[in-house]
Image: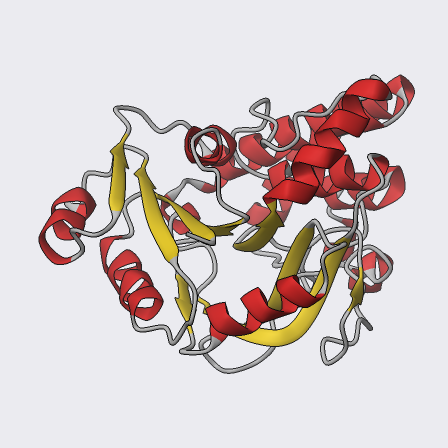
Amino acid sequence: MNLSIIIVSFNVREQLRKNLESIFNSNVNFGFEVFVVDNNSVDKSVEMIKKYFPQVRLIENKNNLGFAKANNQILKLIKNKYALLLNPDMKLKNDTLQNIYNWMENNKQVSIAGIKLLGKDGKIIKHVRRFPKFFDQLAIILKIPHIFPQILNKYILNKFNYTKECQVDSIRGGFFMMNLKNLQKLQKVSVLKNLDNTLPFLDERYFIWFEEVDFCKQVYVAGGEVWYTPVAECIDYVGQSFNQVDRKVKQNYFKDSQLKYFKKWHSIWQYFVLKIAWVLGKIITNVLEVFHVKGKGKT
């Protein structure tokens, strides 16, 4: 086997079925295996997998362990050259796996790679980001992008050219190609430098949100490379699992992960200022909801 594909799923049976169909319909000249970690779905996702995809290696969790911990369940088991963390609401094209595999084989220095993601309307999903900084995250908390969306242009790389490959800070965790041999080398570097790294695993302090950004940051500080390449494409139906979660719960997940990220990577004063800002941010959110104000920009 050359590639292990890891899918963490929660109550998205139909999207998962289409996802698995696209994987097994792929045209490839290398061996791969597919793991699905089900985080206690109640929509009969498990039964669907057992009936239609018996070749899938299924892990049935009794609780929702979140994204990082569920992926780590498999990352701690596999010994292959590459791993692909793949969201269940992704639909691969016939040549997606072969194209990214070939690219990784020709770019041995790359530790993490992301590809061109397309919405169901065929438009490019802008997912490459700079590492979060204090002022852009403060703006998000205080809902400033609702009025001045351009304030986040540098953070979300609004003018990023998705037709060209280049080294980047971070990419979307929905299609997260990992060179495991490189990551194991970076783990040794991290130990020597006494870095707060969990490589080659995700940091389980994050339940959802920021875990892939944190992982890219770990790679960066250890001297590794994260790249975006348009050589392969995938359809991204964006957040089908997360759409089932209440807005206030989502906001709490985001808050929790954002603060953990800043406590880990930034000055302690920035962490405390953001923590205090969330009190005001929640008030602003409530006011915006009362007046039915919707944001103009994406974060």
Asked whether residue 203 is in view, the answer is yes
Side of 218 where 42 appears, left or right: left
Task: Please name the residue shown 83% across and 17% down the image.
Answer: 194
Residue 22, x across and y down, in percent: 33, 70
The residue that appears at 18% across and 50% down in the rendered structure is: 49
Tell me residue 273's x, y (percent).
Answer: 85, 24
Tell me residue 228's x, y (percent): 71, 64
Nearer to the camera, 3 or 204:
3
Q: Using the image, determine if residue 67 lies above or below residue 229.
A: above
Q: Percent x, y for residue 97? A: 48, 68
In the image, taking residue 151 as reference, residue 246 lies left or right, namely: left
* Residue 123 against residue 152 in the figure, above or below: below
Quadrant (top left, top right, bottom left, bottom right) of the C terminus = bottom right
In this rendered view, identify the residue nearer to me: 216 or 250.
216
Picture layout, residue 231 above or below residue 56: below
Q: In the image, what residue occupies the spot 43% across and 76% down? A: 93
Residue 283 visible somewhere in the drawing: no
Q: As drawn, is 207 to the left or to the right of 106?
A: left
> Residue at position x 83%, y 46% from top?
136
Q: Nearer the viewer, residue 14 or 254?
A: 14
Q: Specify the quadrant of the image occupied by residue 27.
A: bottom left
Above or below residue 280? Residue 27 is: below
Residue 65's quadrant in the figure?
Answer: top left
